[in-house]
């Protein structure tokens, strides 16, 4: 083995000598300077130096790669290197092609033999387009049918478009502004607006319901003063020929002045009840009109035809003009004219029942003005007519009423009696009626005030300013049960020179004595106080024969105490002085005196100012004649 290594070493030395470098054993080349330090290669550079004979590479010149901005059109777009490219130049593009809107950062790498490789960059911008011109949200008008209605965007919607609606899909009548927002990645967001009109007038029932709002005259009086609340189940005591407890005398009496108010309210109720079948038949009338609307959706402003209500045929006319609407219904028995003004919030009505009763009214939420022309019984004259007008105004809960009445055989020719009343009513206080309804023809009443408790309907008292035989009087009236010292009363139909009847109180055997005014005035022989039979009415409940109840007004006479205003302070002494055995003590109801006398001056003055304001002709003009539509109805 040792001999083989020696041979290899000799061969290596020979080769080294031949090629000039050391080998085997680390022998150096003879050209190497052992003391000279070798250079260290630079990192990233080849260790072998460049071949000095290799030629330098060229650089690209005169070429560009320019950015560009275009509007989206759905086509593919790209950037291109321009300029003089050397032959066989290779161009490699990166991120250089775009179709959708956006910003593309593109690059182009140029390479060619003997050229330094060149990389260029540019930006391709594709802007969002605008939606096509035919894209629209058209307004629309539809007829109310209880279904939901919507607007829809129309036109050439690009693929990928999303439409979001706001305030769309409506059912109820009205005007709605609908918004459609269109979004698409390649298009600018577009907001469209349109109006959806759902015609409310096409709802026949709503129209008819507005027209059929009817008045309730009784609602302007306190509930306690309605016939139902005032009524007795049996007639109160009306026979006083034997000693009768004053507490048995009904306190819910209706005096002459309030009775006039009840007259016109009763006449209006008669007309309204006769027309009740129509007022409660809104659905039947609306059904006929709705059919007409459905068949004439473009113009349903006027309908003329026939309508059957509760098996009764009527000629009908319905007209709608803006906020105003009208319903006319008639046959040979009744003609009904109803109008509504939605803008002014007013309803009008005229009901004529053959030639018996005609009612005309005008109403709002807080007012009611109505007039009645009615045939009434007038003793020996069976064809007397009464023409009345009553206006109620409610303000802050307080009701004021103005009543005018003309009564005669033929009011258009000869008005026999005129009555005027002023009404004020506080539902938590008192209802006061001031009028001039006369007790008898020889009395000239200046003002007659009646006061009622609004919560009970009880008669509180009255004050009368009147002229009797040229003498002026101011007299107060009170129920006997409210006057201290009176327990029973007995009345005999025996005139005694001062009173048409002779009255006994508290079981006495001698007549109740009065006292004259005395002095030197025109009223010197008049009585300071006395008990007289007063004409009043009671409401009495009775069966109508069909399971219902009616409230009849029954006239009667009841004993009531009067005292002259000038003698109020002396009343107690006067009564006990003249009647020591039967009335040892007496006193007027102090609270009732104040309630009656306090408002009298104001009521009297106001009443005097208004009582001549309205003439018969004005009431007749307000009632008017029935519409010419009914000319053929008999």
Image: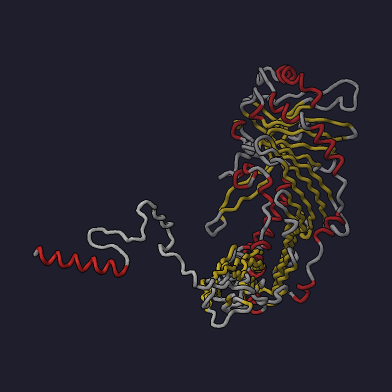
Position of residue 153 relative to residue 233, above or below, is below
Q: Is residue 582 above or below residue 243?
A: above
Q: In the picture, residue 534 is in which quadrant?
A: top right
Q: Nearer the viewer, residue 593 or 165?
A: 165
Which of the two residues, 96 or 12, is positioned nearer the viewer here? 12
Most foreground residue, 314 or 542: 314
- Residue 45 appears at what percent x and percent y? 44, 61
* Residue lying at the far bottom of the rendered structure: 87
Q: Position of residue 57 (x, y in %)?
A: 54, 72
Tell whether 241 sits left or right of 379: left
406 over 4 or under it: above or below? above
Looking at the image, which residue is at 74% across and 40% down?
424
> Does residue 361 sit above or below 440 in this rendering?
below
Which quarter of the figure is the C terminus placed in?
Answer: bottom right
**x, y percent for residue 130:** 65, 71
Assign the N terminus to one quadrant of the image.
Answer: bottom left
From the viewer's perspective, tell me whether residue 154 is left or right of residue 326.
left
Q: Which residue occupies the foreground of this view, 344 or 171? A: 171
Type of colouring: secondary structure
How far across and down, in percent of the image, does residue 294 sit?
63, 77
């Amino acid at each position: 083995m040792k001999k083989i290594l020696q041979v290899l070493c000799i061969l290596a030395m020979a080769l080294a000598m031949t090629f000039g470098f050391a080998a085997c054993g680390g022998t150096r080349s003879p050209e190497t300077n052992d003391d000279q330090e070798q250079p260290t290669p630079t990192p990233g550079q080849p260790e072998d130096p460049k071949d000095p004979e290799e030629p330098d590479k060229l650089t690209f010149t005169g070429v560009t790669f320019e950015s560009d901005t275009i509007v989206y059109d759905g086509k593919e777009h790209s950037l291109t290197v321009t300029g003089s490219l050397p032959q066989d130049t290779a161009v490699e593009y990166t991120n250089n092609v775009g179709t959708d809107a956006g910003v593309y950062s593109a690059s182009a790498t140029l390479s060619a033999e003997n050229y330094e490789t060149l990389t260029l960059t540019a930006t391709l911008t594709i802007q969002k387009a605008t939606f096509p011109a035919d894209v629209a949200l058209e307004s629309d008008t539809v007829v109310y049918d209880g279904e939901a209605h919507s607007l829809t965007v129309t036109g050439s919607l690009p693929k990928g478009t999303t439409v979001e609606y706001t305030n769309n899909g409506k059912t109820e009548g009205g005007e709605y502004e609908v918004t459609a927002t269109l979004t698409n990645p390649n298009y600018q967001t577009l907001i469209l607006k349109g109006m959806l009109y759902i015609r409310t007038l096409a709802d026949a029932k709503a129209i008819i319901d507005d027209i059929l709002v009817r008045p309730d005259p009784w609602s302007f009086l306190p509930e306690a003063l309605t016939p139902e609340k005032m009524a007795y189940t049996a007639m109160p005591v009306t026979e006083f020929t034997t000693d009768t407890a004053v507490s048995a005398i009904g306190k819910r009496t209706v005096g002459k002045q309030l009775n006039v108010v009840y007259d016109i309210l009763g006449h209006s109720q008669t007309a309204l009840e006769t027309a009740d079948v129509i007022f409660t038949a809104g659905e039947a009338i609306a059904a006929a009109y709705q059919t007409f609307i459905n068949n004439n959706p473009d113009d349903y402003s006027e309908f003329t035809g026939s309508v059957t209500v509760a098996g009764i045929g009527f000629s009908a006319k319905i007209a709608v003009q803006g906020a105003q609407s009208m319903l006319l219904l008639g046959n040979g028995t009744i003609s009904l004219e109803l109008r509504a003004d939605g803008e002014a919030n007013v309803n009008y009505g005229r009901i004529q029942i053959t030639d018996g009763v005609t009612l005309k009214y005008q109403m709002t939420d807080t007012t009611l003005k109505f007039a009645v022309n009615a045939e009434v019984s007038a003793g020996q004259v069976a064809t007397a007519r009464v023409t009345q007008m009553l206006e109620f105004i409610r303000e802050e809960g307080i009701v004021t009423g103005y009543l005018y009445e003309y009564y005669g055989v033929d009011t258009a020719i000869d008005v026999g009696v005129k009555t005027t009343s002023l009404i004020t009513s506080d539902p938590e206080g008192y209802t006061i009626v001031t009028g001039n309804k006369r007790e008898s023809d020889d009395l000239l009443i200046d003002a007659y005030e009646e006061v009622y408790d609004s919560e009970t309907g009880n008669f509180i008292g009255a004050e009368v300013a009147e002229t009797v035989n040229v003498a002026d009087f101011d007299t107060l009236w009170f129920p006997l049960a409210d006057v201290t010292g009176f327990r029973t009363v007995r009345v005999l139909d025996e005139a005694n020179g001062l009173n048409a009847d002779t009255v006994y109180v508290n079981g006495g055997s001698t007549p109740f004595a009065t006292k004259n005014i005395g002095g030197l005035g025109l009223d010197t022989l008049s009585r300071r106080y006395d008990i007289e039979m007063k004409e009043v009415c009671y409401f009495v409940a009775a069966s109508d024969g069909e399971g219902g109840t009616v409230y009849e007004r029954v006239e009667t006479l009841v004993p009531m105490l009067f005292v002259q205003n000038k003698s109020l302070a002396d009343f107690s002494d006067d009564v006990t002085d003249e009647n020591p055995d039967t009335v040892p003590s007496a006193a007027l109801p102090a609270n009732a005196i104040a309630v009656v006398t306090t408002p009298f001056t104001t009521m009297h003055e106001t009443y005097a100012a208004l009582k001549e304001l309205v003439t018969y002709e004005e009431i007749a003009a307000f009632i008017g004649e029935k519409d010419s539509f009914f000319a053929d109805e008999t």
